[in-house]
Structure formats: structure tokens, C-alpha cells
Image (tube, grey):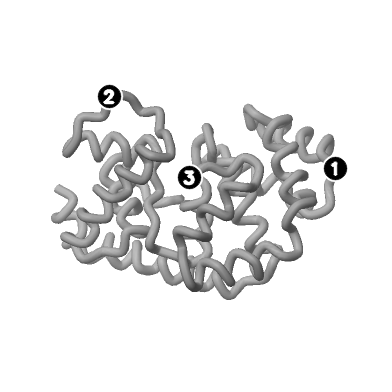
Amino acid sequence: MLRSLLRNAKLRARVLERAEEFKLNNLGDEDLWFRELVFCILTANSSFVSAYHSLQSLGDSIYVGTREEIAKALKESGYRFYNLKATYIVKNRELIYGKLKRTVKEIADVDQLRAREFLLNLHGIGMKEASHFLRNVGYFDLAIIDRHILNFIQNYLVISNKHLTKTKYIYLESVLRGISANLNIQLGLLDLFIWFKETKTLVK
């Protein structure tokens, strides 16, 4: 099924078009990189649609707004974890905004795994969010393992539960790496095909 999706010329063209957008993000400025980071924070325990809608509602407040202002905007947009995510956004802004791109790019251009490890030190960033962020700014050697990807992996493996420890994440990433190599598609783009298979949409 997945192999046939990769043979779908129209879908493959759309995925490669998204890849070019991610590569362009790599050339973007600090504000764009921080906005992508905020987006990935918002996607944790939430849907893409909810996270995207809420990000749009925040506007430039992610750069200058208080925690209370950001929480209020998130709440009004219908986002569930508005206080927690507002706290994460402000704490990360204080910690790394202004040097996010410079610091992460310097590491990721050499070692994407080490860049992900660095991102895990930020607030509200786990393995999935760090991998997602790096993919969205143009790095394609990491897997983005969410519930849709887990559903797909269960076709190949028996997964006792869907709680992903760091060790389990790395193991499942190695499985996906083997699949991507077999299908001749970059690991960071494989999830887009799987997402389409599981949801019939191509967003992220």
C-alpha cells in the first residue's frame, strides 16, 4: 500500500513540493524559525488543525506578548492547554529567541541527532516535537512519530502501548529508517506519505 502511494506521481509531487517549502524555511529569518518552534509546541497533544488555527490567532504576540496575553489568545481560539503552552512559549522566548536559528543550524548542519538532543532542553519539546521542528526547517534525517505513524507501524510490529519513551522512539525511528531506505525516500518525508495513507490529507 505504501509503495503504491510512492508510485503515485501526483502525491509524490505534492510531497516534494512540501520538501522545497521546508528547505526555504531553512533560509528564513529568526522570526520564522521561532514561529515554527511555537507551532511544534502547539501540536503536542493537539491536532494539526487546532495548532495551526491557534498559531494564526497569536500573530506577533509570540514575539512580544506576555504569558497572560498569549494564554488569552489561545483560549479564545479554542485551544485546550492555553496556560501551559503560553508558559512554554514565553520561557522559550526568554531562553533562545534571537539565537534559535544560529544555534540550531550550526549543530544540525553537522549532526541532526545532536541538534534534536539540544532541542530537548527547551520547554514543551519532546522527541516528536524536536524532530518535527527540524523537518520543518529543512532537515530530513529524523522521524516524526505521532499517533498516525504509530498506527502504521503496528502493521509491522506489535506495540504493547503507545506511550513513547525516548528509547522506544529511537527504536521505532530505526524501523522507519529501514522502510524509508527500502522505498528510497528521505526519512523526514516518509511521514507525509504515511499521513496521507492514514488520514487522506497532506498537511503538517
Between residue 170 and residue 181, name the one nearer to us: 170
In the image, which is nearer the foreground, mark 2 or mark 1? 2
Residue at 26%, 64% in the rendered image: 185
Residue assigned mark 3: 127
In the rendered view, does 117 fall on the left or right side of 191? Answer: right
Q: CA distance from mark 3 to mark 1?
A: 27 Å
Between residue 7 and residue 38, name the one nearer to us: 38
Judge whether 157 appears above or below 138 on screen.
above
Between residue 14 and residue 70, name the one nearer to us: 70
- Labels in figure, total: 3
- Pointer 2 or 1: first along the chain: 1
Residue assigned mark 2: 160
Percent coordinates x, y for residue 31 in the rendering: 70, 63
Q: Secondary structure at mark 2?
A: loop
Which image quadrant for residue 77?
A: top right
- Pointer 3 or 1: first along the chain: 1
Q: CA distance from mark 2 to mark 1?
A: 42 Å
Which image quadrant for residue 170?
A: top left
Residue assigned mark 1: 66
Badge 3 amino acid: Met
